[in-house]
Structures are given as structure tokens and as C-alpha cells.
Image (cartoon, grey):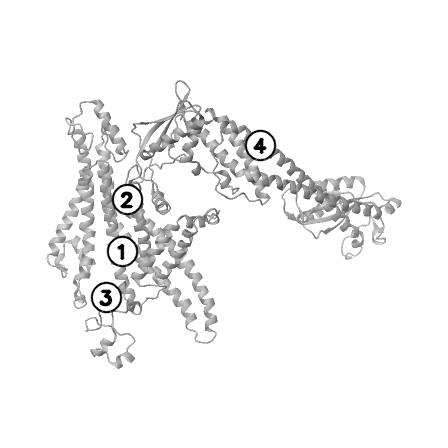
């Protein structure tokens, strides 16, 4: 709990790694994820560092692995499942992995090129077959066209002798040529117009669409093609036609001069296509075997190359000593993990067989350490909420432990409904029970990943919503009468306040709690269910929830101010307790704490008998600032004097908050020359520089060398600027005083969203479910099924998803703005350990793994 409250204590350490064992030691540290390395060569270009060639080799292997993974995914071959975590390969084994990958790449490339060549040949033969089959009847079809189409006078015999072939035309002395082939269906219109414009009518174009889809060899898409036959007159026209066909990427095939030749060509094509199918199937089987063999080891190679590249990257951050036999690295490490770090270095030295072991040495520093807060599955989600506002400063109080309770509670105050809370809790419980399912964890749906990562947050929000739903006595906008109502209607008749005629003559009747037996006491848990039937229900709930929101808000803000004391004490700034914390707390409690007191006092003192004479709290709170306590009936004796006293205290707290800290720091800097003020609350004479150094080193280990909150000796040596400190404190004072007003009003969103959620739930029930329940015919049961389905869909989409998201965002704002800014600065640097498990992978980002 202490680690979650304040973070781990960090230290700066030097690692002395022998050149022969540095690789194995870094590998051990990467498996453990204990330390964050610092760059000791910031002025050296990335391309001029020692291990840049090794990193290039790793990138070349990553390129080959990417090619293998794409081919495996294209072949729809699944990678072997299981938790594979191979160690980083030794440098002497890198060349063997490199050669194996290159051999696989060459083999796979050759097989793939052969397969593509066979597929292209098969496509050409298939297109040639379609061309011969479709173009057989072109001449016959031309004679059946409508007479309105254009007739070509150059070939009048075509209309008379439809079965005349090319040889008979040559005997007539006609220099007639044919070009046949296939073109994409989308280009046939432009292709026909281009032929007409360029050839000026000296061509005859016949075309027909192929019924089957053909695969485009370039894109792999299924496309529709058109078979065309062009008859042209003269060699010059033929050259133009060929150029047009090349321009439109037509697949041109030779046109047979006779029917016998056509039949021979078709028979030869059929035989070649069968042979190509056989060879292609064998090639695909061999390619699949190669890919299956590669898929068994490709995931292991990916992890090994990633680890190896990360190790060489870390080695580039280290520097050599003067003998060039030892690598020196500087790391941030948690103090509690120093023994584990030593054991990791010893294990790395043992694996490498080094004669001189590597070791670690802590060094003093004035640099601010990074912030490390260890979390588990439950606390990680709430820590992410806090870190989204800002990473905490080193050893600063962490709001996450308190957010675990306050965040789902404030959410539930706005979302309070028993039925909706049960649905949300069951959904989250299902995710928690199946949290180790690989299909649920490893998805590429970002929205689902967001819900799954926050499953424990959703579970707590659902459980707290069940509790507040019981308090509100609200379940799908209906109340549950579990313990029996505390109100009794028959007592009004027994006391003869109501007559039988009153029931028939009045639409609304008022229960009088002053009548004996009408009100028997409060409901044991939550709000009495009779309020769900009352016409003034909304007025009652508005007053109740509005006061409840103010009370919760003041308690929440006061708790945030109190938490700031832990920072002041830990960072040895005791003067902030008197000059910052105390004025802030007095200002908040004297004004808004007194408002909470009046609310609770009015609830406890005034009963149903004298409730009509109870004064308005809002009027009293306004008169408190106007000093007009005698204008209205007092809430209690001596109220005016107490209110004047509280206002005076609150007003006096403002100048103390504004001037106290700057004046004290100015006196501390210029008014105590004879006293060495190393710490804010100590007055110790410093006669020895060695003693001063030891004190600083001791404080650094205790975490007091914080850049913003500590008052170390180095800070005292800096020049003190009174104007700058005064301006900073003035901004803080104005922000805090005005923020107390605006933040208290901001907590009224608890009332507003709770009211909106209850009203939306009631409207949905009245407009959907009530319509189905009112049908008293035999078909009412059948009609109720789709009505309930519609009600369930609208409940999930509107009330659970949309309203839940709205309440989540408002609870987030209350924690970030109203709660955390009272004690949490959030300007630190997050601890990023060197860990193989945390390294990003480009293959995962592209969906290859």
C-alpha cells in the first residue's frame, strides 16, 4: 500500500559491465525489467555509435521476417499458439539465424515467382480459350444486328455471305486483317470510340462479354473482361489498331484463319491448361509446406531479433572506461530491487563465462528521479486514470488508492439504478472471469480493448451503482417495496381527516405526517417506495440530491486539502502546514463547511410538525456574506455572531495564504545569515563541507531532493526572487479561493446527472414497456416480445452506454479538477524500464502477429 500511495524509492546506480559479459547482463536485465537506462553519449550521432552495424543486421532480419509473416498470413496459415519466450540469441549464433532466414527468403521467393508465372500463363491460356469460343459467332451475330446501325461499304459481302472465312476473302483480293483479344469491361466504351476516331471507319469492331470472372494478375481482383474482334483494311490501319490496343492494355491473341486451325488450337489449349493445373497444384502444395515449416519458427525468430536489437540499442547508450575493457551504464532503479539487480548481473557474468564479474554501485545525484508506482490488475486501471491527468512527481502522494473508492462511488451517484447496475456488473464480471482468454485479449478492436482493459473499473462502477440504486430505491424507474412503506393511508380515514367523498371528488390528496399513524418512521434502506407514486416526487428528490451533492463535494475537496499535508511533511516543508494548508482548510470549512453544517442541522432539528417554519438555508448563506442576520428568522440561537466570526476567519485566511509563504521564504533567505538553513525546519550550524555533503546524500536516499517540493541546499544556493514567488503565490491564492466557489457548484453535476438518468429511465419505461403491458388481448403476450426487445436495446444503448459514458466523463472531471488539484501537481516523469515485454513491435502494429 505504501508503494501505491507514494511510489517506489528510486536511486541512480552505475553498472560496470565487462566487455565479454555486457551482452548477457543486458539480456538478463531486459527479462526482469528493473532499470531505466540513461544515455551517456547524448552528443554522438545514432549512425556513429559502436553497434550500429549489428542494429542494421537486426533490421535486415526484421525485413525478412516481415516478408515471411505476410506470406504466411496470405496463405491463411495460423501461427502456433502458446506462450513462447525464447532468450536473446548469443552474438555467435546471429549469423546462423541470418543464413537460415536468407535461405528461406530465397527459396520462398523462387517458389512464389514460379507460382505467379504459372498463374499468369494459365490466365493467358484461359483468356485465349474464351476469345476463341466467343469470337466464333461474331460474323454470324453481325448479320443479325438492327438495320439502324452503321453499315460499312468497304466490305459489302459480309452482309451476304456470313460464313466466308479469311482465305475466301483473300481470294477476292481484299487485304483484310484481324486483331482479337480481351479488354476490361470498364474500358470498352472508350476503346470503341478511339477506334472510330482514329481509323475513320476503316474497321469493324465486334465484342461480347465473357460470362466468367477473370483474375487480374496485377491486383488479384476478380474482373469482368470483354472479347473483341477487329477487322481492318490495310497495313497502316493495322498499325494504328495495334497501338490503340497497347494503349488500353489489351491482351491480344492470334486469330485463326480457318475453322480447322481454330479447332486444333482449342484442343491444344485444353491439354496445356490441364498440364498447367497439375503443375500449379504441386507448386502450391510445395509452397504451403515451406510456409508451414517457416511458421513453426517465425514467431520465435521475431522475439529473438527484437530482443537482440534492443540489447544493442542499450549497449549504444553505454560508455567505455579509459581502458576500453569495461562498459559503464547509468540506470534508475528502485532501491528495493538493488539485490535483484546484483543477482541479475552475477547471472549474466556466469552465463558468459567472464573471469571478472560485473557489479553495481549507487551514486549520489541532484537529478529528479522518475516516478514508479507498481500496480496489479485491479489498480492499474485507476492508475491510468490518474496518469492521464499527469504523472506524479517523485514521492508525491498518489491519488490512485483513494480513486479506487471515490471514482466508482461518484459515478454511481450519477448513475444510481439497481437494474442498470446489475447489468453493468454482470458484463464486467464476465470479462473478469474470462480475462485470460486469448481471443478477448488479442483483438484489434480499439473500443473493445478499452472496455476490456477497464473491466475492474466497470465492475466496481456496477457494484456501487447497485448500492446507490438501493438508496434511491430505483430499478428501471420503478421502486421496490421490500420492507413495507412507512406511510399509512388508512390512518387518514381513522382520524376522519379524509371522507369517502374526498376520494371521488379530488384527483390528488395530501398525506399529513402530523396525523397519528400516518407516518410510522423512515424506510429502513433508502427512499420510501411511496414517493414513486407522489406527484411532488421530483421536488422532493431535487432537494434531497442537491443537498447530498453539496455535502459530498465539500467532503471530497476537504479530503484533498488534507492529503496535501503528507506532501508538506515528507518533503520537509513544515512551514507550508501553517502558511498554506491551514489557511486553505479554514477558508473552505468556514464557508462551505458551515453550509454543510446548516444542511445537516436543519435535517436533524426540524420535524414534520415545525417544518413549515424552517428557514431557507440559501437565504441564510447569502445573508452570511451580507452581514444581515437579523432580517430573517435564525436557524439556531447565536447564529449571527457565529457567522460573522466564520466570515472574518475566512477573510483573514486570504492574506495569510497570499503573503505568508513569500515573506517567510524572503526572511529565510535574507534574515538568517548566521544560521545555515539546510532544511526548512532545522537551524544547524554548518562548519564542514563534508558534513553538508553527507546530509545531502542522506536526504537524496530518503527522497527529499525533489525538484519542486524539496528545500535542499542546492535550492538555497539559487538566487531567491521575491517578486516571482509572490506572483506565483498570488495566482495560487486567486485560483484556490475562486475555485472553492466554482468547485462546490461543480459538484451539483451529481444532482443534475442523477436526475437526468432517472427521468430518461422513466420516459423509456412509459413510452415503450407500458405500451406493451397495457394490451389486455390474447395477442398482448406476442406483442410484448418485440416491445421487450426494443426496451432492452434502448436500455443498453442509451441508458447504459451513452449515460454511462456521460457519468464516467463527469466523474473523471470531478477527480481531475476538483479533487486532485488540491494536492497533486502531476508534472513528474514516468519510470520506463528496459523490459522485453514492454517493447513495441512493428509486426503487431501492422496486424501480422
* Quadrant assignment, res 284: top right
Q: Real-space Cα distance between discs 4 and 2?
A: 58 Å
Residue at mark 2: 821
Classify mark 3: helix, strand or loop: loop
In depth, the one of 412 and 92 nearer the eye is: 92
Question: What residue sits 19% from the left and 61% below the top?
Answer: 603
Q: x%, y% of residue 368? A: 31, 32
Compare marks 4 and 2 and give the one earlier in the sequence.
Answer: 4
Classify mark 1: helix, strand or loop: helix
Q: With respect to residue 689, does 379 lie above or below? A: below
Categorize mark 4 by other alpha carbons within 10 Å: few (<14), some (14-19), many (20+): few
Q: With respect to residue 28, does 595 lie above or below? A: below
Compare marks 4 and 3 and give the one earlier in the sequence.
Answer: 4
In depth, the one of 762 and 835 nearer the eye is: 835
Which disc is residue 522 wearing? 3
In depth, the one of 101 and 253 nearer the eye is: 101
Compare marks 2 and 3 and give the one earlier in the sequence.
Answer: 3
Whether the residues at callouts 3 and 1 have beta carbons within 8 Å, the answer is: no
Compare marks 4 and 1 and give the one earlier in the sequence.
Answer: 4
In depth, the one of 386 and 91 nearer the eye is: 91
Residue at mark 4: 100
Q: Nearer the viewer, mark 4 or mark 3?
A: 4
In the picture, measured across the screen, residue 709 lies left or right of residue 424, that is left
Q: Real-space Cα distance between discs 4 and 3?
A: 80 Å
In the picture, measured across the screen, residue 113 lies left or right of residue 702, that is right
Classify mark 4: helix, strand or loop: helix
Q: x%, y% of residue 695? A: 22, 28
Whether the residues at callouts 1 and 2 have beta carbons within 8 Å, the answer is: no
Q: Real-space Cα distance between discs 4 and 1?
A: 68 Å
Which residue is at the far top? Answer: 323
Amino acid at each position: 500500500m505504501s508503494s501505491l500511495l507514494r511510489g517506489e524509492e528510486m536511486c541512480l546506480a552505475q553498472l560496470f559491465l565487462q566487455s565479454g559479459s555486457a551482452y548477457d547482463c543486458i539480456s538478463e536485465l531486459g527479462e526482469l525489467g528493473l532499470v531505466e537506462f540513461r544515455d551517456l553519449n547524448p552528443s554522438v550521432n545514432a549512425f556513429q555509435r559502436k553497434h550500429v552495424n549489428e542494429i542494421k543486421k537486426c533490421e535486415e532480419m526484421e525485413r525478412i521476417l516481415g516478408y515471411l509473416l505476410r506470406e504466411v498470413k496470405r496463405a491463411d496459415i495460423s501461427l502456433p499458439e502458446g506462450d513462447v519466450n525464447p532468450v536473446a540469441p548469443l552474438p555467435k549464433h546471429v549469423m546462423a539465424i541470418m543464413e537460415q532466414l536468407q535461405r528461406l527468403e530465397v527459396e520462398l521467393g523462387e517458389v512464389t515467382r514460379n507460382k505467379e508465372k504459372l498463374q499468369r500463363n494459365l490466365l493467358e491460356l484461359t483468356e485465349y480459350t474464351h476469345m476463341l469460343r466467343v469470337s466464333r459467332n461474331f460474323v454470324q451475330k453481325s448479320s443479325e444486328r438492327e438495320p439502324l446501325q452503321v453499315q460499312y461499304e468497304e466490305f459489302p459481302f459480309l452482309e451476304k455471305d456470313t460464313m466466308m472465312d479469311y482465305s475466301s476473302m483473300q481470294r477476292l483480293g481484299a487485304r483484310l486483317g484481324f486483331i482479337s483479344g480481351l479488354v476490361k469491361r470498364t474500358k470498352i466504351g472508350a476503346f470503341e470510340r478511339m477506334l472510330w476516331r482514329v481509323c475513320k471507319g476503316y474497321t469493324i469492331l465486334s465484342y461480347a462479354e465473357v460470362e466468367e470472372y477473370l483474375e487480374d494478375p496485377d491486383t488479384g481482383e476478380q474482373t469482368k473482361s470483354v472479347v473483341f474482334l477487329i477487322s481492318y483494311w490495310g497495313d497502316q490501319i493495322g498499325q494504328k489498331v495495334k497501338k490503340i490496343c497497347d494503349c488500353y492494355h489489351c491482351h491480344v491473341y492470334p486469330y485463326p484463319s480457318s475453322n480447322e486451325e481454330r479447332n486444333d488450337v482449342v484442343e491444344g489449349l485444353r491439354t496445356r491448361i490441364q498440364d498447367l493445373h497439375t503443375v500449379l497444384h504441386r507448386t502450391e502444395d510445395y509452397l504451403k509446406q515451406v510456409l508451414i515449416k517457416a511458421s513453426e519458427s517465425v514467431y520465435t525468430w521475431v522475439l529473438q531479433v527484437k530482443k537482440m536489437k534492443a540489447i544493442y540499442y542499450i549497449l549504444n547508450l553505454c560508455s567505455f572506461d579509459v581502458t576500453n575493457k569495461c562498459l559503464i551504464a547509468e540506470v534508475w532503479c528502485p532501491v528495493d530491487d538493488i539485490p535483484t539487480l546484483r543477482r541479475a548481473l552475477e547471472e549474466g557474468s556466469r552465463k558468459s563465462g567472464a573471469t571478472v564479474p560485473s557489479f553495481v554501485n549507487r551514486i549520489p545525484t541532484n537529478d529528479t528521479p522518475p516516478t514508479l508506482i507498481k500496480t496489479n490488475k485491479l489498480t492499474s486501471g485507476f492508475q491510468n486514470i490518474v496518469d492521464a491527468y499527469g504523472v506524479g512527481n517523485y514521492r508525491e502522494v498518489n491519488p490512485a488508492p483513494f480513486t479506487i473508492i471515490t471514482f466508482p462511488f461518484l459515478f454511481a451517484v450519477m448513475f444510481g439504478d439497481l437494474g442498470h447496475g446489475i447489468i453493468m456488473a454482470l458484463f464486467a464480471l464476465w470479462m473478469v472471469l474470462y480475462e485470460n482468454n486469448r481471443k478477448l485479449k488479442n483483438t484489434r478492436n480499439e473500443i473493445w480493448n478499452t472496455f476490456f482493459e477497464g473491466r475492474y473499473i466497470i465492475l466496481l462502477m456496477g457494484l456501487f451503482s447497485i448500492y446507490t440504486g438501493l438508496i434511491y430505491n430505483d430499478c428501471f424507474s420503478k421502486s421496490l417495496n421490500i420492507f413495507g412503506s412507512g406511510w399509512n393511508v388508512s390512518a387518514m380515514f381513522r382520524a376522519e381527516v379524509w371522507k369517502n367523498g374526498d376520494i371521488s371528488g379530488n384527483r390528488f390528496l395530501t398525506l399529513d405526517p402530523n396525523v397519528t399513524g400516518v407516518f410510522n418512521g423512515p424506510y429502513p434502506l433508502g427512499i420510501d417506495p411511496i414517493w414513486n407514486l407522489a406527484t411532488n416526487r421530483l421536488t422532493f428528490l431535487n432537494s434531497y440530491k442537491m443537498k447530498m451533492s453539496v455535502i459530498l463535494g465539500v467532503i471530497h475537496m476537504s479530503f484533498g486539502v488534507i492529503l496535501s499535508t503528507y506532501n508538506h511533511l515528507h518533503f520537509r516543508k513544515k512551514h507550508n502546514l501553517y502558511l498554506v494548508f491551514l489557511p486553505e482548510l479554514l477558508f473552505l470549512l468556514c464557508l462551505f463547511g458551515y453550509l454543510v453544517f446548516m444542511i445537516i442541522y436543519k435535517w436533524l432539528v426540524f420535524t414534520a410538525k415545525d417544518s413549515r417554519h424552517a428557514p431557507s438555508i440559501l437565504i441564510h448563506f447569502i445573508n452570511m456574506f451580507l452581514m444581515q442576520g437579523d432580517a430573517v428568522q435564525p436557524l439556531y440561537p447565536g447564529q449571527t455572531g457565529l457567522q460573522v466570526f466564520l466570515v472574518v476567519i475566512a477573510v483573514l485566511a486570504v492574506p495569510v495564504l497570499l503573503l505568508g509563504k513569500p515573506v517567510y521564504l524572503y526572511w529565510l533567505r535574507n534574515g538568517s545569515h548566521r544560521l545555515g538553513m539546510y532544511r526548512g525546519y532545522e537551524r544547524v550550524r554548518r562548519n564542514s563541507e563534508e558534513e553538508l555533503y553527507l546530509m545531502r546524500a542522506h536526504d537524496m536516499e530518503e527522497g527529499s531532493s525533489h525538484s519542486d517540493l524539496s528545500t535542499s541546499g542546492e535550492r538555497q544556493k539559487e538566487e531567491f526572487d521575491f517578486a516571482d514567488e509572490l506572483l506565483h503565490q498570488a495566482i495560487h491564492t486567486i485560483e484556490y479561493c475562486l475555485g472553492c466557489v466554482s468547485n462546490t457548484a461543480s459538484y451539483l453535476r451529481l444532482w443534475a446527472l442523477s436526475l437526468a438518468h432517472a427521468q430518461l429511465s422513466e420516459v423509456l419505461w412509459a413510452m415503450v414497456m407500458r405500451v406493451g403491458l397495457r394490451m389486455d388481448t390474447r395477442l398482448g403476450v406476442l406483442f410484448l416480445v418485440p416491445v421487450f426487445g426494443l426496451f432492452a436495446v434502448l436500455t443498453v444503448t442509451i441508458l447504459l452506454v451513452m449515460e454511462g459514458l456521460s457519468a464516467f466523463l463527469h466523474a473523471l472531471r470531478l477527480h481531475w479538477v476538483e479533487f486532485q488539484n488540491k494536492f497533486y501537481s502531476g508534472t513528474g516523469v514516468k519510470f520506463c524500464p528496459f523490459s522485453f515485454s514492454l517493447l513495441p513491435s512493428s509486426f503487431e502494429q501492422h496486424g501480422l502477429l
